Structures are given as C-alpha cells and as structure tokens.
Image (tube, helix red, strand yellow):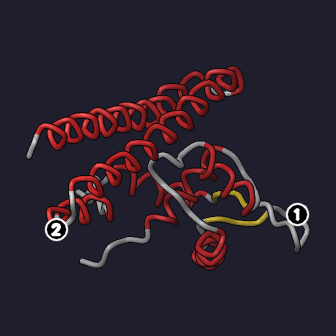
Amino acid sequence: MASKNKTRYAILGILSIHSGTGYDIKKYCDTVISNFWNENFGHIYPVLNQLLEDGWIQTDESSSPRKKVYSITETGRLEFLKWLAEPAGYQPERSEFLLKFTFSSNLDKKAILRMLSDYRKMHCDRLDKYQLMQKDLQKGLKDVVPERELFLYAPLRLGILNTRAAIDWCDEIMMALEKSN
C-alpha cells in the first residue's frame, strides 16, 4: 500500500482549527508542532494547491491573490477525520548521530566524548526551547478552547521528557566511556 502524504493531514489539522495563509500554516508548524513535525514553504504550497484541486480546502473570497486565506471544506474535514481514526503506523527514528555513534569505536575516546558532549548540548538547547514553548503555551492558553489544552500540552510534554532522557543518556554513556580503558 502506498504511504499517504502526511503533510496534507498536518495542513488539514491546522485549518480545522482556524483558517490561514500559507505563512500562518508555516508559523503554526514552527511554533506549535515543531518538536515532532516540521514543514517548509517549498512543501506547504504545492500541497495547498493539491488540496485545493482535490476540493479539501478552499480560498476565502475576500483574500487577495497574493495573500490567499485557506479554510477546510466539509469534504476535507471528513477526509481529515477519516485519517485521524486510522491507527498511526510505526516510524523508526532516523538519527545521523546514532548511526555515527554506532560505528564510533573507530574513533579515539576524546573524539567520542566530544561527539557526545556536542549532542548533549544540542539537547540542552532544545530543552530550553521547549521550556520557552511551554511558558508561551501557558500564557496563550486563555486564547485556546479548553478542549484543546491537553492536545497542545501533551506532545510538548513528550518532547520535554524525551529530550531530558537524551541528556541523561549522554551523561550515562560519557560516564561509562570515561571509566573504560
């Protein structure tokens, strides 16, 4: 079975909450779902055009040709709900770092420790970003309908917990390496 383009469902999900421009969709991706999903403009606009062609979204009559405001149609909402009801497939993580680390016994201990330290710092920076997102989310919750609060908070919380786990893992592996010959 061919895999479905998940970008279309990310866009439909965003438009199921509120209408917006391509820029608004990208901004939502960057600020709300960036800890587990990312999109770029080069991918968003072709998918928007395909969704328009499929009749899953429409442009608002009042929008200008240069700044189109998109909204989900009833057909799009039904397709989106159908997709939501399907079980999510397993997607193995692709990590260049873990691929390199798996083969890093070919490096000296100092280089491996530097690699782990850099990876740890990247996760510390990410944790800082997530904690800022959490503060922003808490401030902005007054603008969110209560039914959506948990669904915004839970993925961010998972990102925070996973990032802390990665930092703990780095500490554990660096300590093990330092103890080894």
Q: Nearer the viewer, residue 73 or 177?
A: 177
Residue 145 relative to residue 87: left or right: right
Along the viewing direction, whichever of 154 and 70 lies nearer the viewer: 154
Label ID, residue 63: 1
User: For mark 2, does the 10 Å Cα neighbourhood hold few (<14), some (14 to 19), or many (20 or more) residues?
Assistant: few
Marks 1, 2: nearer the viewer:
2
Name the residue carrying label 2. 106
Q: Position of residue 156 (x, y in %)?
A: 47, 35
Residue 128, picture quadrant: top right
Q: What is the x, y in percent for residue 92?
A: 24, 59
The answer to whether marks 1 and 2 mark residues whose Cβ atoms lie closer than 8 Å is: no
Decide: few, some or many residues near mark 1? Use Cα within 10 Å; few <14, some 14-19, many ≥20: few
Q: Nearer the viewer, residue 72 or 148?
A: 148
Residue drawn 25% across the image and 38% down it: 169
Q: Quadrant of residue 97?
A: bottom left
Residue 69 versus residue 126 in the image, above or below: below
Q: Which amino acid does the dot numbered 2 rest on?
A: Asn
Is residue 36 positioned above or below 144 on the image?
below
Mark 1: which amino acid? Ser
Specify the label residue 71 is tagged with: none
On-image quarter of the N terminus: bottom left
Residue at image location 34% in from the left, 54% down from the top: 115
Residue at 69% from the left image edge and 26% from the top image edge: 140
Q: As rendered, which of 178 and 58 lies closer to the eye?
A: 178
Residue 142 position within the rendered picture, expressed as x and y whole percent measured from the top left: 69, 20
